[in-house]
């Protein structure tokens, strides 16, 4: 394999045309498998380099991005973060084939959903690599439509309600909103706990006065207002919340929450609401503004009672909304009620189960990150993704085209 320094030729860096191919591999064995296949495709074997994905990121800072790339994740300690770094230096139209040593279905799905064409586990077999190259080229030659403005009418409007304190509702809501935003969909998280909301805190941010101003004048909520009112932990995620002094705010007037959710839906594809259960007594009408209502519960007798009551109430005030019951902290601790008995009592199946994993949550908090960002391959992240799937109509093809690398890794 060539040394990286050989590619950083000034004349080549200034070339206006893109090379058809480049590969960044960590071991000679993989290079030897790729070498004859590259010759067969008419590619220069001088474009096979040592160093893996990290070397590729460094090299692409000094040359036009090739049309097709093979990148090796074998030496990567955080494959998802390294793929994002690669995306930052890539050009639109690049097709990427990833290889590595980790045989993990979650990583495989994450990479494919991100827009990577395929992921092969080493040691590489010549026949499999050849098939992957051929199908990748076919995908590159398939014309696609230009990016269209985001269709806000097809987004999600979901309200999350914790049946009891401490079941992890705030953590769940933040992680689901983050997953939506990672799909390049504009998403707003509305935290209606006016005095003790934690949504912004989970991102190590302060929420500001945006929510209190919006509740006082919901008809003023437009794009310009939201630019000043929200905080943005990432490009596609906005948070509208409050940490107002206790007792300093007036009770929202009737209909203001419903109007606020409608205004947010005019500016964001996805609106995710965390609604304290105490608000249901006076603001149940807001539930009619959302498509999905998620009840977060544990397996306790009290929760079973309250779940029965809330389901009946929701069917009265928001009959068109879909109700999802999510069980939290379902492993590692004793349960008062078995899942089957709980489902029988509420006459509804559990949509997803979230394990009790304080260690993973604490590790993410120490990094000021969410679990799905800090520990994307954990069982807890998989559970949060299952919740998102439960409240979303998932189109796998659209998912691949709309992942966090989609605008870079497509033709």
Image (cartoon, grey):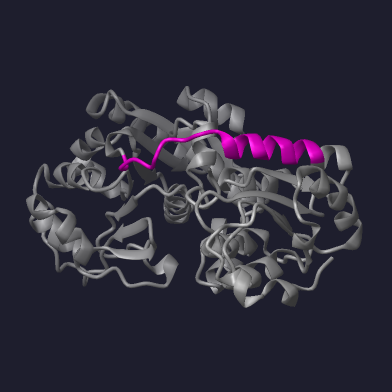
Residue at the spot x=81%, y=69% of the render? 2
Left or right of residue 119: residue 340: left
> Which quarter of the figure has residue 266?
top left
Which one is nearer the viewer's eye here, 246 or 80? 80
x then y, percent, for residue 179: 48, 50
- Residue 273 shown left or right of residue 183 in the figure: left
Visible residue check, residue 328: no
329 in magenta: no
Q: Position of residue 120 (x, y in %)?
A: 77, 46
133 within the magenta span: yes
Q: Position of residue 59 (x, y in %)?
A: 65, 71
> Which residue corresponds to the image point at 87% horizontal and 48% vertical from the top-left?
36
Q: Nearer the viewer, residue 363 or 104?
A: 104
In terms of depth relative to the viewer, which is nearer, 137 or 318? 137
Figure check: 313 above or below 72: above
- Residues shaded magenta: 130-150
Q: Position of residue 57 (x, y in %)?
A: 63, 68
Asked if residue 146 is positioned above or below residue 321 in the image, the reply reads below
Q: Residue at x 34, y 40 (%)?
A: 148
Image quarter hosting the N terminus: bottom right
């Amino acid at each position: 394999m060539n040394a990286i320094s050989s590619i950083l030729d000034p004349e080549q860096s200034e070339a206006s045309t893109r090379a058809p191919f480049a590969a960044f591999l960590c071991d000679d064995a993989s290079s030897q498998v790729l070498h004859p296949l590259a010759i067969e495709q008419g590619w220069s074997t001088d474009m096979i380099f040592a160093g893996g994905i990290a070397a590729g990121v460094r090299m692409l800072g000094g040359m036009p991005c090739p049309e097709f790339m093979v990148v090796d994740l074998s030496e990567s300690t955080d494959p998802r973060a390294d793929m994002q770094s690669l995306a930052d230096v890539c050009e639109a139209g690049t097709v990427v084939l990833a290889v590595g040593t980790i045989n993990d279905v979650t990583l495989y799905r994450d990479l494919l959903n991100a827009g990577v064409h395929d992921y092969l586990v080493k040691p590489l077999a010549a026949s499999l690599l050849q098939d992957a190259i051929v199908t990748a080229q076919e995908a590159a030659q398939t014309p696609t439509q230009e990016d269209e403005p985001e269709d806000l009418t097809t987004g999600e409007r979901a309200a999350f309600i914790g049946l009891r304190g401490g079941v992890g509702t705030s953590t769940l809501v933040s992680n689901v909103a983050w997953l939506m935003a990672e799909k390049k969909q504009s998403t707003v998280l509305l935290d209606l706990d006016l005095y003790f909301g934690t949504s912004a805190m989970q991102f190590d941010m302060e929420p500001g006065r945006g929510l209190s101003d919006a509740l006082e004048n919901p008809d003023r909520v437009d794009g310009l207002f939201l630019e000043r009112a929200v905080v943005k932990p990432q490009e596609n995620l906005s948070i509208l919340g409050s940490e107002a002094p206790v007792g300093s705010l007036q009770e929202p007037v009737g209909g203001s929450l419903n109007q606020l959710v409608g205004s947010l839906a005019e500016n964001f594809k996805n609106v995710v609401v965390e609604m304290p259960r105490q608000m249901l007594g006076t603001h149940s009408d807001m539930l009619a503004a959302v498509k999905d209502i998620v009840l977060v519960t544990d397996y306790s007798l009290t929760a079973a009672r309250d779940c029965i009551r809330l389901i009946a109430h929701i069917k009265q005030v928001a009959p068109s909304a879909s109700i999802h019951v999510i069980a939290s902290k379902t492993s590692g601790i004793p349960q008062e009620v078995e899942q089957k008995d709980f489902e029988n009592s509420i006459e509804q199946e559990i949509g997803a189960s979230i394990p009790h994993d304080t260690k993973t949550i604490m590790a993410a908090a120490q990094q000021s990150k969410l679990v799905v960002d800090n520990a994307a391959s954990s069982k807890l992240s998989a559970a949060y993704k299952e919740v998102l799937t439960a409240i979303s109509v998932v189109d796998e093809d659209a998912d691949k085209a709309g992942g966090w690398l989609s605008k870079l890794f497509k033709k």
